[in-house]
Image (cartoon, helix red, strand yellow):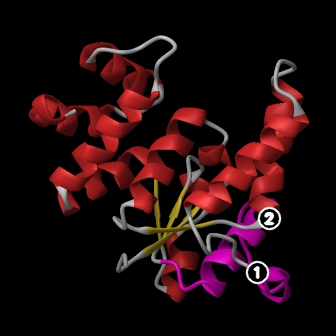
Amino acid sequence: MANFTAVIDSCVLYSATLRDVLLRAASTDLFRARWSDAINQEWTSSLLENRTDIKLADLKRTVELMSRAVPDCLVTHYEPLIDSLKLPDPGDRHVLAAAIRCDADVIVTNNIKDFPKTVLSQYQIEVQAPDVFLGHLFDLDKIAFSETIKDHRASLRNPKMDVETFLQMYLSNGLPITVSKLETVKELI
């Protein structure tokens, strides 16, 4: 079982690429991934609003598959904490509340500024961008992480991607640190 827990924010789950790599990494026990129904609601609503080609039924299936891939991923009973929390964006309080409730070590988000260290330090929680977080997973166990990335690349069949194209996709998804580390183990991915 993984020895640390990360709450994944909706802005990270919104990206299919980031969602896929993080779920694959969580399924190998590199870390314990957690989120809430409210986080699921945020990213799925945003995706439906921004992508008319995606159907609600498909997203419901994705959420179901996420829950199967990462058992015990849903944080519950965090709602009573929300009103007592102070963040720059009050709409993010539910994310922090979920992180507190599940004793998370880190919140993985693209909205770093919305989770000030001064607030999070009170709960011994860090905030990290997905690229930084994935870089730490590589440093934690580069073999297991490389296998995760290899599986991710192999799952993409339409079109099938060579390593260079795959790493370029990661770059276009804002993962330069991760790509830099993966460049050192190309033969493993």
Q: Quadrant of residue 81?
A: bottom right
* Rendered-image quadrant of the C terminus: top left
Q: Residue at 76% of width from left, 80% of height from top?
A: 76
The image shows residue 141, relative to residue 187, as above or below, that is below
Distance from Cα at disc 1 to Cα at disc 2: 8 Å
Q: Amino acid at mark 2?
A: Asp
Q: Is residue 99 covered in magenta?
A: yes
* Rendered-image quadrant of the N terminus: bottom left
Q: Residue at 54% of width from left, 77% of height from top?
A: 120
- Secondary structure under tag 1 reads loop
Q: Is residue 174 covered in magenta?
A: no
Q: Quadrant of residue 96?
A: bottom right
Crowdedness of circle 1 by 10 Å Cα count: few (<14), some, many (20+)?
A: some
Q: Residue at 56% of width from left, 53% of height from top?
A: 109
**Left or right of 106 in this view: 3:** left
The span picked out in magenta is 76-104
**Left or right of 159 in this view: 119:** right
Q: Nearer the viewer, residue 59 or 37?
A: 59
Q: Amino acid at mark 1?
A: Thr
Q: Quadrant of residue 146?
A: top left
**Left or right of 25 in this view: 71:** right
Name the spot of residue 119 as percent of width and height, x first: 58, 77
The image shows residue 48, relative to residue 2, as above or below, that is above
Q: Which residue is mark 2?
A: 37
Name the spot of residue 148 as percent of width and height, x first: 33, 46
- Secondary structure under tag 2 reads helix
Q: Which residue is mark 1?
A: 76
Q: Looking at the image, is mark 1 or mark 2 earlier in the sequence?
A: 2
